[in-house]
Amino acid sequence: MKRLRRRMGVAAAALVVGVLAVAPSFGQGVQPRVETFDNGLELIMVERHEQPTVACGMFFDVGSIDDPRGQSGIAHLFEHMLFKGTRTVGTTNYEAERTFLAQQDELRSQMDVEMDHMRLRKRHGQMTDVLDPEQWTPKYAEMKKRYDGLIEAQREYIVNNELANLYSSNGGAMLNAGTAEDITMYFVQLPSNKLELFMWLESDRMVNGVMREFYVERDNVREERRLRTESTPTGKFDEAFEALFWQAHPYGIPVLGWASEVESITRADCLEFYKKFYAPNRCRMVLVGDFDPDKTIEMAKRYFGSLPASTFPRPLVVTEEPKPIAERRFYAEAETNPRVRIRFRGVAMGHSDEAALDMVSQLLSGKTGRLYKRLVTDEDVSSGQPFAGNEARKYAGHFEITAIVKDGSTPERVEKLLLEELAKLAEGEISDREIQKVKNQVLAGSVRRLKSNFGLMFQLGMFDTWFDWSYINESPKRMLAVTADDVRRVIAEYLDPTTRTVAIYTTKAGTKSDVDPELAQLLADMPEESHEMIKGMAKQFTSAEDGAKLGMMLQRMEQSLNSEQMPEEQKPMAEYMVKLIKARIAELEAKGDKESN
Amino acid sequence: MNYLKSTIVVMLAFCVTATTVNADAPLAAHPKDLKFPELNYQVPPAAEFREVLSNGIVVYIAEDRELPTFDLAITVRTGGAFDPPGKEGLAGLAGEMIRDGGTQNVAPAELDEQLDFLAASIRTGVSDTAGRASLSCLAKDVDESLTILMDVLRYPRFDEERIRLATERRLQDIKRRNDSTGSIEGIEWDFLMYGNEHFMNSYPSSASLQAITRDDLIAFHHEYFHPGNMMISVAGDFDRNEMLAKLEKTFADWPAGKPTAKKFDGPTFEPKPGVYLIDKADVNQGRVSLGHRSIMRGTPDEYALRVMNNILGGSGFQSRLVARVRSDEGLAYSVGSGFGQGTYYPGDFRCFFQSKSNSCAYAAQLVIEQIKRLHDEKVAQDELDQAISYITENFPSRFPNKMAILRTYARDEYTGRDPGYWQSVVDKVKKVTADDVQRVARKYLHSDNLVILAVGDAKAIRGGGHDKAADLKLDAFGTVTELPLRDPDTLER
């Protein structure tokens, strides 16, 4: 139920998994059994009998890049809705529910009209928040109340979260789903005797979903956005950076949607989206674990074979990100370690230069990579591990270098050194050992990643959605073929500093709560450059241990407070300081008494 | 021979598959009507994997020959809990530096280089209550990697430069403890539950980090990192007897040393029920926790408590808290509960959610209603059955591979749990009744003695104002104590 956050660390495809040159039991890499039904559904199966479970996943060709204009976030919201049941699951009486659903839709369309009025009022400055009950028009408030009543009445027939309950009470583990820009997936791990439950529930919700309790779930999705984006130290900024980086491509639109748009998506929008994007020919089912493939194919045919293929043309994103014509920069003050992110345009998954760009990222990253040696060991300007990642998505990709700025250094200096290392890689010597080290890691990584059925299921499903499942074997082969010349060539071609997009995060100075509210108020009247000094002084007073010294300071402070020289506007601050010193002296005396007792 | 026989039994159990398909049979009208084949999974007993080396090191070992890999993990009896006052952070730093600070024979950068070239990974670390070292490599590199591991474990260099870098990184990071409401909430909750004095709340500060010397790290290593404190788990592509002989040889000349006698103490602090609020302006969502201290593990009520917590909020979508707060009301993306049964000291009972500021009070009320409901009403049979099967049917998933089984048994031995625990847990959970659930809810959940903590926009959270409960404000649950943010470095205020 979450937005898929693709970690840069995964370096998307190439390093994830692959050829098992050293894995005898897998011979020529992963060789799944693949079966395609007449309606277009693809089955990708890998048998493994180590434990009595099956990792199961459904991967759809749909994501936030398919969100219609004005409905950003709908692919993700829709993914939530597929957990709310179907005509059979999640209800005791769908026919009875239908009456309520129709009434709700009717009332909602009236509410939407009123909501449009409120949006207009907001645009004209007559209200500030269309979601704030206190600001609602009486008409809207009245309709909302009636609407809640209809939901309450429908509840009699709703079986809460039945799909999830069926899975979990049958041993379904890790039940969840995820939406990214160009993929939506639903997955669960089941005991091997329960595979038929997966077939039943997934074939049902591929076509029979009822968007029940839609507006409640939309609220939950809004909470998810608050949780992940709006209430985290860097969430808002990371989102804004994506929008800056992608000028034309829909990859720049947040998967969780823009707040105002998510809040406006309707049930009708979702039903329309369902019709377009959910069908067997837009999906592959991946199973990894303990099952019999022949019998499983039979079973899948019984459940999915008769579902109709979608005739909606397979949409292709035609938008090409224009070549950047200028450097773009982004400065953000956030409550976080200072950090630099430098981003370049990369390539789509499967592109012939993807492996070479992956090699660049690996040569730079890690504890023995070039960035760590230069920025941490030699120059001591970065804390943690600087990192480079090549992320190749279905339609386009990017290459990013990032480092945390160590206290005492500056983002600009870190940025300069990061770019210098990139230039050195393009122009200087690259040793055979350096490249071989990365290749050794690619090989070992490709074996290790197979340890988990769940992980293998994910990789097969994602590769197949973005490119082809066989990429699991192909991408390491491509990595093993990369040469130093390839590295130099792709840096020159893609990682041109004049086309970079840069985000610089600096640490937000003491937030309100770090400072006594009274002091904060006084500071507002003082010149900005004096704030640090004053705060330091206050801290000195409140932590001083020498009572006698404090006494002298108090005397001096009181004297100057009473003298003519003290400008009137500075008096409140001086009075505040006097108060602080007195309080500290009292504190020290009390402490002294306690100790001498 | 015993070992072999039971392995075959286990393999047979593994091979039971789902499918007895009759292609012509009509599909079940409802998934509840589906009939599934039997699956009786039993995790093999600990004794099947347990060996003891001649210097006394306990080894949990299993062949796992599907992939050409090798994994070894060592549990070390130590913990940050033993950090001397004024040197908080010592164990954590020492744990990192044993690997990261190089060895007496190999400088740190060279060690990194060797391991990266082998594509092997060695890690060391120390948490509050355990130390750990691990090696992961390809099976073909076992000998070379084990040699490096022993060099790391026995002869760490504690390189001055690496200590400086690690210390400075920590000094920078501790300033960031108040950045996110999640971090503020987590830290404060533990203080409210366990007080200032308990070791889980003794965090490194800039002063304590700067007080730690290289000699402290050396002394720490000497005191704890020896075979007398170690237990090994090892799985991978090897022959069991050959690997045992190899480990025997590898560890033979390392004197065992005396096991640590230190114990992990419990708290002396008693939580004070009440409503606590921490202001973090400019976030639009509040994080709320409600609960109290719970108990140690090992009571006969353990199983009923697990079922009870699943019903309340411990089983995801199946639970009542998700049903009410999320599914019915749309108030939170994430909501749930945990009833901790502590290993060394009492755990905590904690319900949690995150909701937009003005609905925090309303959501808190819904949570409290659900706690009370467990006291007042007996759970219905089908809800009970679901909560039970959530545990019993999930049992095979607990052990996704051999290493997971070994790690479980090694941890059990480290913490002193009965080795037969996993063989009986499913049966015991199945025996839990609706009466049991109500009885333990009444005995262990105290809805009128809750600590309630909210972090976020204090003014908005306090004011409430959700459209379904316009008059409900946070002080409906008691006088609100507003706590200033702690100093991120010292965590004092």
Image: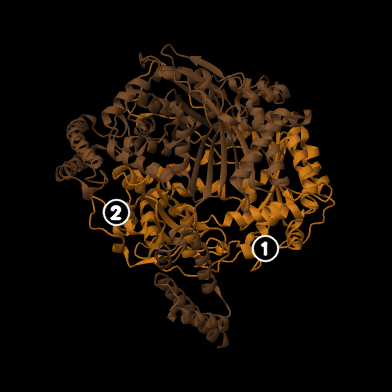
Chain colours: A brown, B orange
Q: Is residue B385 visible?
A: no
Extreme residue in the front direction = A564
Which chain contains the residue that carries disc 1?
A: B
Extreme residue in the bottom direction = A597
Q: List x then y, in percent, for residue A558.
A: 46, 81
Locate residue A363 relative to residue B106 in the image: left or right.
left
Q: Is residue B415 above or below residue B49?
A: below
Spatial CA distance of label 1 from label 2 is 46 Å
Say if mark 1 contacts mark 2, CB within 8 Å. no
Three-letter amino acid code of the residue under disc 2? Tyr
Callout 2 secondary element: helix
Q: List x then y, in percent, for residue B89.
A: 64, 60
Q: Is residue B397 visible?
A: yes
Q: List x then y, in percent, for residue A258.
A: 37, 36
Three-letter amino acid code of the residue under disc 1? Gln
Locate residue B235 relative to residue A411 in the image: left or right.
right
**Quadrant of res B127:** bottom right
* Residue occupying the point 30% across, 53% down: B358
Mark whose residue sits in front, 1 or 2: 1
- Give neighbour class at mark 1: few <14, some 14-19, many 20+ (Cα, 10 Å): some
Q: Kindly indicate whether the residues beneath marks 1 and 2 are on one polypeptide chain.
A: yes
Mark sitting earlier along the chain (1/2) = 1
Give B418 or A247, whichever is nearer the viewer. Answer: A247
Q: List x then y, in percent, for residue A326.
A: 52, 29
Callout 1 secondary element: helix
Give A388 or A380, whichever is nearer the viewer. Answer: A380
Q: Residue B362 got which mark?
A: 2
Q: Which residue is mark 1?
A: B210
